[in-house]
Image (tube, grey):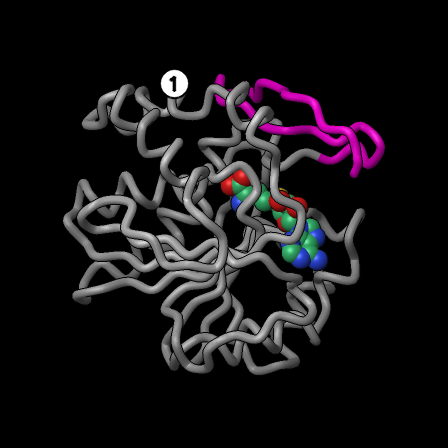
């Protein structure tokens, strides 16, 4: 397993950094800002007109996206089923040293820090490959598996959070073969959202039938992608 270090990003929120790859789990310009912009505002928020939102995340990682989505689901009283794939889980020791809930309060001020800390623990303590009710409006299923070979439900999800490491370090995950699985798992009208915006990713998404929209990126990034199944 590659060595990881904790780093504090520009908005004060923490991330994990892999020195051997010079790659971090989130943007150095602000982990929380990035997650809120790419996955909440340009992902989950697009489906709040329906009675339930089904999310599939590529890369559970630190659980930051899961915790943010849980907080939004409770705030908006919007039932959310959250499935998240991960092949290399972060260790409990690393999670205990990551002050994620402590830095979320300034962004989601309705949430109490102690409650967030409890929820964050519950998210990480929950067993793999089992649907667990984390809170009234949020169910989590952490799926232990590989993006390339995972079997997914077809025409099922509203939104895919595509949060793999960058193409520079894992080019094999930004391929048509991987995006095809995500496409098939989405229902018609569903959305894949990702922080990436490079030309090859856009081309691969277009080739398998997505309608690609370029949007303004989070702080420090000019653009990001929303890809619609239409
Ligand atoms: C950018 S990080 C995800 C960050 C995460 N969403 C968060 O909120 O902290 C990418 C994740 O993909 C996982 N990963 C890398 N290769 C994978 C593969 N082939 N299958 C499944 N997970 C993989 C990594 O272990 C890492 O947790």
Magenta segment: does it hold 17? yes
Q: Identify the residue at horizontal 32%, vertical 34% (top origin).
A: 119
Name the quadrant containing residue 37: top left
Q: Name the image quarter holding the C terminus.
A: bottom left
Q: Which segment is the magenta one? A: 1-23
Q: In the shown orientation, is residue 51 left or right of residue 227? A: left
Dot 1 corresponds to which residue?
Answer: 102
Whether residue 216 is situated above or below residue 185 in the rendered picture: above
At mark 1, the secondary structure is helix
Which residue is at the front of the view, 103 or 204? 103
User: Horizontal and vertical percent for residue 151?
Assistant: 57, 75
User: Horizontal and vertical percent for residue 32?
Assistant: 45, 31
User: Horizontal and vertical percent for residue 142?
Assistant: 48, 54
The answer to whether residue 161 shows anywhere in this view is no
Q: Identify the residue at horizontal 56%, vertical 82% (top origin).
A: 209
Whether residue 141 is situated above or below residue 230 in the rendered picture: above
The answer to whether residue 38 shows anywhere in this view is yes
Which residue is at the front of the view, 139 or 208? 139
Which residue is at the front of the view, 226 or 139? 139
């Amino acid at each position: 397993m590659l060595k990881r270090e904790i780093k504090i990003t520009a908005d004060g929120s923490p991330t994990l950094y892999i020195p051997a790859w010079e790659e971090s789990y989130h943007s150095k310009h602000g982990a929380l800002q990035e997650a809120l912009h790419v996955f909440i505002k340009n992902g989950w928020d697009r489906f709040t007109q329906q009675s339930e939102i089904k999310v599939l995340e590529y890369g559970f990682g630190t659980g930051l996206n899961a915790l943010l989505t849980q907080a939004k689901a409770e705030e908006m009283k919007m039932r959310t089923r959250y499935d998240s794939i991960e092949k290399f889980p972060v260790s409990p020791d690393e999670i205990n040293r990551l002050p994620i809930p402590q830095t979320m309060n300034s962004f989601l001020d309705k949430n109490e820090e102690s409650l967030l800390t409890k929820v964050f623990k519950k998210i990480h303590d929950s067993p793999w490959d089992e649907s667990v009710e984390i809170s009234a409006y949020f169910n989590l299923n952490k799926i232990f598996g590989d993006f390339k070979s995972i079997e997914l439900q077809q025409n099922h999800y509203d939104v895919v959070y595509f949060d793999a490491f960058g193409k520079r370090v894992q080019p094999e995950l930004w391929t048509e073969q991987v995006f095809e699985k995500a496409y098939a798992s989405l229902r018609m009208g569903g959305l894949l959202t990702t922080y990436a915006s490079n030309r090859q990713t856009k081309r691969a998404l277009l080739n398998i039938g997505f309608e690609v929209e370029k949007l303004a990126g989070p702080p420090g990034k000019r653009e990001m992608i929303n890809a619609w199944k239409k």
